[in-house]
Amino acid sequence: MSFWRVILAIICPPLAVIGKGCGSILIVFILWIFGWVPGVIAALVILNNPER
C-alpha cells in the first residue's frame, strides 16, 4: 500500500481502489455515498488486503 494510495483513499475512496476490480469499486462507492467514513475504512481495508 503506497503513500499516495492512502492519501487518495482519504480524499476520494473509489479512486483509490480502481485497480482492485469492479466489485471493490462498487462497494466502496456505495459506502462512500452513505458516508465518508465508511468509504474510507472500506478503501483502506481493501488496499491493505495482500491477497487481492
Image (tube, rainbow, N blue to C red):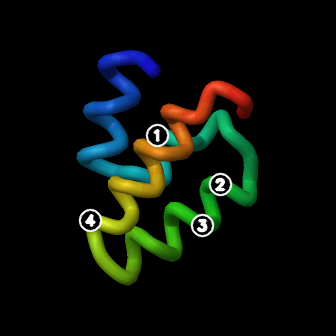
Dot 2 alpha-carbon crowd within 10 angstroms: few under 14, some 14 to 19, many 20 or more: some
Question: Which amino acid type corresponds to the residue marked 1 in the rendered image?
Answer: Ala
Looking at the rendered structure, the secondary structure element under dot 3 is helix
Q: Closer to the N terminus: mark 2 or mark 4? A: 2
Looking at the rendered structure, the secondary structure element under dot 2 is helix
- Direction from residue 22 to residue 48 in the image, left or right: left
Question: Which amino acid type corresponds to the residue marked 3 in the rendered image?
Answer: Ile
* Residue 39 percent coordinates (x, y): 39, 62
The reply to whether callout 2 and callout 3 are in contact (CB within 8 Å) is yes
The reply to whether callout 1 and callout 4 are in contact (CB within 8 Å) is no
Q: How far apart are marks 4 and 3 (CA)?
A: 13 Å
* Residue 23 percent coordinates (x, y): 73, 59
Dot 3 alpha-carbon crowd within 10 angstroms: few under 14, some 14 to 19, many 20 or more: some
Q: Closer to the N terminus: mark 3 or mark 1? A: 1
Residue 44's disc number = none
Relative to the observer, which residue lies in front, 4 or 37? Answer: 37
The reply to whether callout 2 and callout 1 are in contact (CB within 8 Å) is no
Task: Check the image and report above or below for 34 versus 25.
Answer: below
Q: Residue at coordinates 45% horizontally, 73% vertically from top-left?
A: 31
Task: Check the image and report above or below for 10 versus 52.
Answer: below
Question: Which amino acid type corresponds to the residue marked 2 in the rendered image?
Answer: Ser
Relative to the observer, which residue lies in front, 45 or 36? Answer: 45
* Residue 25 percent coordinates (x, y): 61, 56
Dot 1 alpha-carbon crowd within 10 angstroms: few under 14, some 14 to 19, many 20 or more: many
Question: Which amino acid type corresponds to the residue marked 4 in the rendered image?
Answer: Val
Residue 37's disc number = 4
Q: Distance between the residues labelled 2 and 3?
A: 5 Å
Pointer 3 residue: 27
Residue 16's disc number = 1
Looking at the rendered structure, the secondary structure element under dot 4 is helix
Q: In which quarter of the image is residue 26?
A: bottom right
Q: How far apart are marks 1 and 4 (CA)?
A: 14 Å
